[in-house]
Amino acid sequence: MTVSNNVGDWLDIGPVSQISPGNARTLPVRGGEEIAIFHTLDNQFYALVNKCPHKQGPLSQGIVHGNVVACPLHNWNISLKSGEALGSDEGCVPTVPLKVDAGRIYLLREAVIPSRTARKAA
Amino acid sequence: MDFQVGNESRTEDGAVILIPTEGVREHLVVVGNGMAGCRAIEELLARDAGRYRVTIFGAEPHVNYNRIMLSPVLAGEKTFEDIVINSRQWYDENDIELIAGDPVTAINRAAKTVTSRSGRTVGYDKLLIATGSDPFMIPVPGKDLPGVISFRDMKDVDTMLEAAANGGGAVVIGGGLLGLEAAHGLTLRGMKVTVIHLMPTLMERQLDEAAGWLLKTALEGRGQTILTGADTAEIYGEGQVEGVRLKDGRDIPASLVVMAVGIRPSVALAREAGLDIGRGIKVDDHMVTSDPDVFAVGECVEHDGNVYGLVAPLWDMCRSLADGLTDRHTGYRGSVTSTKLKVAGLDVFSAGDFSGGEGCEDIVLRDASRGVYKRVVVKDDKVIGAVLYGDTADGGWYFDLLRKGEDVGEIRDLLIFGQAFASGGGQADPKAAVAALSDDAEICGCNGVSKGQVVACVEAGNCTLDAVRATCKASASCGSCTGLVETLLAVTLGEDYSGERATRTVCKCTSFGHDDVRREIVAQGMKSIPEVMHKLHWSTPEGCSSCRPALNYYLLCALPGGYRDDQQSRFVNERMHANIQKDGTYSVVPRMWGGLTNPRELRAIADVVEKYNAPMVKVTGGQRLDIFGIRKEDLPAVWADLNAAGMVSGHAYGKSLRTVKTCVGSEWCRFGTQDSTGLGVKIERMTWGSWMPHKFKIAASGCPRNCAEATIKDFGVVCVDSGYELHVGGNGGIHVRATDLLCKVATEQEALDYCAAFIQLYREEARYLERTAPWIGRVGVDYVKSRIVEDDEGREALRARFLFSQSFSQEDPWARRAAGEDAELHQHLAEVRPMEFAV
């Protein structure tokens, strides 16, 4: 892997206070997938690619309950922890490793920034 | 160099050599005379009392006292003497030199010495850093004014007592454990206390939303003002604090401000000395820092990525340290923490992880009459978290199950009832447990119904839950025994029990139907979503995407002007005030009263379409213009442009009044009988902005040719020569339904009055997401007539309630967003731009 020296390299997204509990905000990525960062009412943070596995609805705009978001287009329930569709629906959206440290949100850089080859293809 | 204390000596040629000064005892110097430093020494003394010579430096001019007990001192329940842990005598008896009121300001690791503020330099063989933590002061203007303090030591308590003696107002910034204790103490001391908390619920680190709400309600009952979701803008005053101003403009006068927003490990000294620092001083499992002769314990430490602010981990660390210093090397493995505390006499407990997640199951018990909330989180048959409010007796038991990772599969169904139930009964099958109950065992506490009475009721032919509720009243009040009653139905009827209820519940979070919930909201005067969930025994901590919007609407309807709309309980379109499309962009429909427009509005719309590159504009079925393809971040600017031309939100996105469709009527049409266009405009002016159970469409036609298609609308007016025919309950959707004729009225004013009354009846009695067509199908048009046509007084009261409610709802939501409200809903957090994309 050419990016192995990047393992553990985190992108600083800014203070946790930018996302109020129960809400999500978005992070567009040039040449990559937009990411949605969620702050649950239980004060946990999660990051997913901002696309429902069903019809690519923007998950950031859904209602958050527990650690689940209901997609705004067709109400599929997506687990914020695993990205998987819950109940009888099937599908999975990629999650992005996230950590909170000293009040700031960090995303794993290699999961955010697309690889060189993927970018060339795009 | 001239050492005052130490184990160095000089040879005759001046070189410093190290020789043991007191036999073979090594010198252990402790920086910090607090709970961690002294506890470490106690643990050490217990293992090997003679091993080290000990010197302790402390910043405060006191012996070691119990910092956790500062709250009772503030509250007047204890004196300083009561909270002393180690008296002078202890230091003397154990031959410990205490240097109090003289903090260490430098460590020289090469020379193995520490130097204090007064200039005293002491050599060490082993050094223990136990500097604890510093209160975090939020960087707002005025934070350095006299009268702005933290709540960390005895000096802060003295300042608070002094302020309290003069009475007046106090502001506590921070609704965590420490802040609430300060607020409680100051309240008992007679101050008028306001707590400002940034997050929407109190103690969000320890408590979930439901428990946080209970705590807030209880504290408010004790006279404190609790402002949640409140952000401090500045602290002001001339030479002394005079008050706090919030970012939303609110102003709270105060002669004392206590900042209790959090603590930070105190690492300045260690960093200065070149030790490895993360969030705290980094230590290994034996509390050794990056220097093998320097140790650290307590809140200043980072172990395995964790920093602790509670007392239990600190004891664990001190044990491991003392083991290491006496060659036992057990090693610290990190701590699982629990919080059990009393705030203002209220019992609260939390432990472990209660954030939920994959494979996690919430077991929730709510007992509204006793003010009890219990939640246990189970994963793979193990307890992984618990939150208790009001009754924390079983906190220790849950914490024990959690720490030991015990398998609770066997007692899963009785777990929530506590240790006495779960370990005593031994009935693994809840059905068998219920069957084994004696006939006089009470099932429904609210209505005093015994098991025998429920069984008799079922045997008499009441085979559904609703029938039982209607007959013997079991589970008809608070509903918390619904599960028991259903089990009794199943046990009594065996295979005959259908298991289906006549009335569908709101969602899987509750056993109540929509009508029950609405009735109880009004009867009990409930005011917030967490309150409804608590009093009606919701089985999930924060509801789901079905019940949250429903409860939000019911509260909004029940409390016009008195309810704060919960954005997190709104579907995307209502939260964004636009219609989401399949590609994630939005469409925007400005209001055009009665379908009328003018050149100014058309120009503004045309300009918006060009300026924001909207790919499509379309005339809608409701006679409006719909602008497609607007990005969420452009919405506020689009609205500002439309506002500038005098247009407001068209609510094409809401469970609300959508449009009033009109034909041209008597003003232009050769067949027109009345001014239907003018009436349509008047109706829309009266009804716009109102929230409803579902979307609501109106039309007004000028003659029975009915060009406005009024007979497939929720409310339709068909003008005739002699007056106005009023129609209700039409729908042009999946199931086309023509309207029922409600009545005929003579004047335009009556048409308006009946319209307002009908809408209010629908708002108050239909279920959330029930259009007028199925609602009238359910209750019958005769019922609607009896309320609107046959009851003049009732109609007038409904109309008055509608207009009162409208006085709060006719503010353009677009204008508020355009002015910057809730900007974070529209803006991206940031943008990631890899190097080769950089401009």
Image: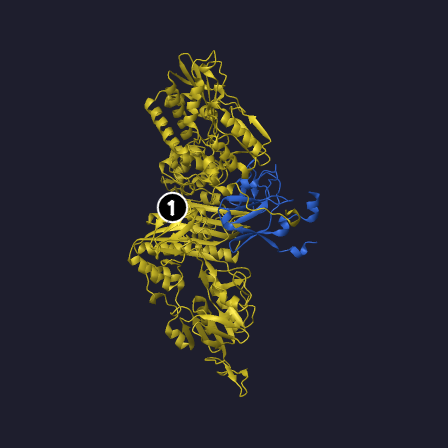
Chain colours: A blue, B yellow
Query: Is residue B712 shown above or below B469?
Result: above
Q: Name the residue under label 1.
A: B250
Q: Image check: B1 left or right of B721?
A: right
Q: Residue at x 53, y 88 (%)?
A: B12
Where is B377 relative to B134, above or below? above
Name above or below for residue B491 compared with residue B14.
above
Q: Which residue lies furthest to the bottom in this view?
A: B12
Where residue A12 appears, as percent x and y from the top left, is 57, 52
Query: Residue B774 appears at what percent x and percent y?
Result: 48, 25
Mark 1 lies on a secondary structure that is loop
Measured as percent of width and height from the top left, residue B37 is found at 45, 69
Which quadrant of the structure image shows residue B70? bottom left
Q: In which quarter of the image is residue A93?
A: top right
| Residue B8 seen in this snapshot | yes
The amino acid sitting under disc 1 is Arg
Residue B667: x and y, percent? 45, 15
Q: How many marks?
A: 1
